[in-house]
Amino acid sequence: MGLNAIPGKDHGQIPPKVRELIAIAVAHATGCPYCIESHVTKGKAVGVTKAEVAEAVLISAALCAGAAAAHGGLAMKFYGEE
């Protein structure tokens, strides 16, 4: 539960609004619906806009797709030469 409190810290170097945007993006990358609900709700409370949520989701999607494409080369390598 200690880890769960980290995004909501208000005395860290990263402001709470930015923390929640990061949490929203990561929640989408990990695919946790409970985290998505929690961090969107908390983000809204600290001033995150709907447009910012949408952008965080798109950034997450782009990075996840990039990782899948990059790792596709590994699949071909492991398949072997034929």
Image (cartoon, grey):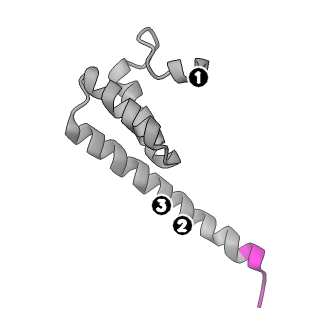
Q: Quadrant of residue 8?
A: top left
Q: Distance between the residues labelled 3 and 1?
A: 27 Å
Sequence-wise, the earlier of marks 2 and 1 is 1
Q: Where is residue 32 in the image (x, y as percent from the top left)?
A: 49, 43
- Where disc 1 sits, the SS reads helix
Query: Observer-nearest residue: 26 or 63?
Result: 26
Q: Is residue 50 left or right of residue 28?
A: left
Q: How crowded is mark 2: few (under 14 residues within 10 Å), some or many (20 or more)?
A: few
Asked which quadrant contains residue 46, the reply is top left
Instruction: Determine whether, in the image, residue 46 is placed left or right of residue 72.
Output: left
Quarter where residue 47 is shown: top left
Which residue lies under the disc numbered 1? 3
The residue to which callout 2 is attached is 69
Residue closest to the far top: 11
Classify the position of the C terminus by image quarter: bottom right
Residue 10 location in percent, x, y?
A: 41, 11
For this orientation, the residue located farthest to the bottom is: 82
Query: Which mark is nearer the camera, 2 or 1?
Result: 1
Q: Which residue is drawn at 41% across and 25% down?
A: 19
Sequence-wise, which precedes: disc 3 or disc 1? 1
Q: Does the magenta stretch include residue 17?
A: no
Between label 3 and label 1, give the one nearer the viewer: 1
Which residue type carries mark 2?
A: Ala
Look at the image and give the residue range highlighted in magenta: 77-82
- Name the residue type under label 3: Ala
**Residue on which disc 3 sits:** 65
Secondary structure state at the residue bearing disc 2:
helix
